[in-house]
Amino acid sequence: MIVNKSMFPLQTGFGVISKMQDRFADLQMQLGTGMKASTLAEMGKDLPMSLSVRSRLAKIEGFSANIDTVNLRLSFLDKTMARFDKIESEARNSAVQGQYGTNNINMATLPDLSKARFDELVTLLNSDVAGRYLFGGANTDTKPLPDTDILLNGETGKAGFKAVVTERKSADAGIDGRGRLASTHTAGTTTVTLAEDGVHPFGMKVSTVSSTSGAVTVTQPTPGTLPLGDQVGVTFAPLPAAQIQAGHTISMGFTLPDGTETQITMKAVTTASTPPSPNEFVIGTDAEATAANFKTALDTKLVEVGSTTLAGASTFAASQNFFNAAGEPVLRVQGNPATATSLRVATEADTVMWYKGQSPAISATGLGRLDISASGSSVSLTERSPSSAAHGFQITGATSTSAVPGGTVATYTGGNPANMGVTFGAGAAAGDRVSLTLQQPDGTTRTVELTAVVGKAGPGQFSVSPTNDPNETAANFSSALKLSVTTAATEAEGNPRQSVTAQIDDATKANYGMEANESGYLRLMRTMASMSVETYPDSDPSARGRFDAMAIRQQSEMSEAHNSERGSIEIITMELGVARSALENATKRHTDYKAQLENLLSDVETVNKEDVAMEILALQTRLQASYQVTSMVSKLSLVNFI
């Protein structure tokens, strides 16, 4: 019998020992690190799961980083919005009609207080967080507003707000300070007329005339407009027995440049007061003399209103022209202000542009700079003057289809401004269509189409008169057109909050964009700027009247009645609250999901150290036994065997 090592395969034994040594090394690494493998390549069949879980965790980390960044910005915005609301409240209480203070202290301090608030507004709207400006929409790398001094006083040949106010006041007051109105009384007559000095947007527009005396006949203004040549009249009864009596009044209502209304009331008296009152006129010896006295008193009253109420309205109208809203251009007076008949679109070469951030070119407010008017059986849609190719809709076409001759006819007139007219005949019937093409400043177009129906109209429809009354059909079409154009303008305007977004989940974005020309900020800017450029010296007899006019307007602009308007401070604050709520919900989801993923990753990539330690002990025993057996086998020989 031959005894040798071939009976004991040492090579195989060495291979087994080597594998056990490798396993022992792996177990020692696992015991030290708690991980199954030191590299992803060693993960084996667990590699796909590990990569998938790690990818999801990395995405969650990215979302969490976005949430942290947005939370920082929202915290700043929350504090800023709270301050805006505080400024609004302070301004509302800082000027009250008739409260001039001891020695007119309120009148003396109000301009400086208003300028300080205006400066704070500019500073807040120009605030940045880590170099990112938050109130310019998507334009985050530059300040959205110029500095306070530039806004008010202009720079290097560019007019600031004060210059625009001066122009507008002169244009509204006119040469004689009567609000661009002229009264006329011809000798030998008993009628006093009042008319504008031209067709223009300036001065006061007579809206109503009334009298408490049966001896006075009034001629009302033409509804809608009062162009040159049209006039209102006050005629006194010529018979002595039918003369106006003391105590009777004549009232006139006026629409002011800022859109507000005012009224003057003139009372008939037998003897002039001492000193004379601007609210009275003396009954003359006959109707002609009474008319002459009324004209003189009316002229005096118009000058008084022009220097007080109209002056305040002019300042606020100038603020509307200079601090332009979204979708509106900056406007200036065209030509010599005192005799001007139109506004013009300001340019960056001659006027400071107050807001340089992102802004929609079309706004739902104001129908995208279009005006709708209805008269009888006709409806017109006209571009607002002065026209601006960079702001609002441009009308580029209108067509109509009608199955019945003389039914519905649409016409388009080009030019600047362009207009569209629709005329309805008795043949207007269900199925008639009017199609309107509107061009946006970026060159794209929108089509607004309205279809006639019988009965209740839905979106994109208008009702035909059940009695075939063209006037009724036109009125229905006008209402439907306004709704459709508003919808188109709203879609074109978009949502300022969506100008800046952050992805905080796979299907969730936080929208927190801010644009400084939204209505809430705009009201603050316009009001504080208007209040800061006015002064009320004791030597000026119109100071108190102007203070009251400005106080009334500040109260109105800062009123909480505006809280529900789109873009108000309160609505924006609520929308920011929605964004913060979305962040909190996303954070909770990510926290819960991250914990689940980390547990799953732990199961895939980590080991139980107690199990590893037990396996090490067992492997160590096996290795020691293998070493001994191998050692013994390696020493086998015939001599040792014998």
Image (tube, grey):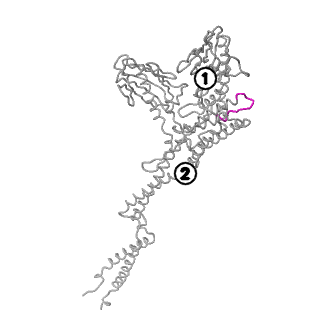
Tell me residue 547's x, y (percent). Answer: 67, 32
The alpha-carbon separation of the residues under discs 1 and 2 comes to 50 Å
Disc 1 or 2, which lies upstream in sequence? 2
- Answer with the quarter of the image where residue 488 lies: top left
Q: Which mark is residue 72?
A: 2
Tell me residue 614's x, y (percent). Answer: 39, 76
Residue 269 to residue 496: above or below: above
Tell me residue 353's x, y (percent). Answer: 60, 34
- Whether residue 155 is visible, yes or no, is no
| Residue placed furthest toward the left | 1
Query: Bounds of the magenta span?
Result: 530-542
Q: In which quarter of the image is the C terminus?
A: bottom left
| Residue placed furthest toward the top | 188
Residue 573 to residue 182: above or below: below
- Answer with the quarter of the image where residue 523 lies: top right
Number of other residues with Cα within 10 Å of mark 1, as a class: few under 14, some 14 to 19, many 20 or more? many
Q: What element carries label 2?
A: helix
Magenta residues, dominant SS class = loop
* Callout 1–callout 2 Cβ contact below 8 Å: no
Task: Name the foreground residue: 270 vs 556.
Answer: 270
Residue 640 to residue 148: above or below: below
Q: In which quarter of the image is the N terminus?
A: bottom left
- Amino acid under label 2? Leu
Q: In this view, does 610 lie to the left or right of 517?
A: left
| Residue placed furthest toward the right | 539
Whether residue 536 appears in magenta in the rendering, the answer is: yes
Task: Name the foreground residue: 117 vs 629.
Answer: 117
Which residue position is annotated with label 1? Answer: 204
Q: In this view, does 531 lie to the left or right of 587?
A: right
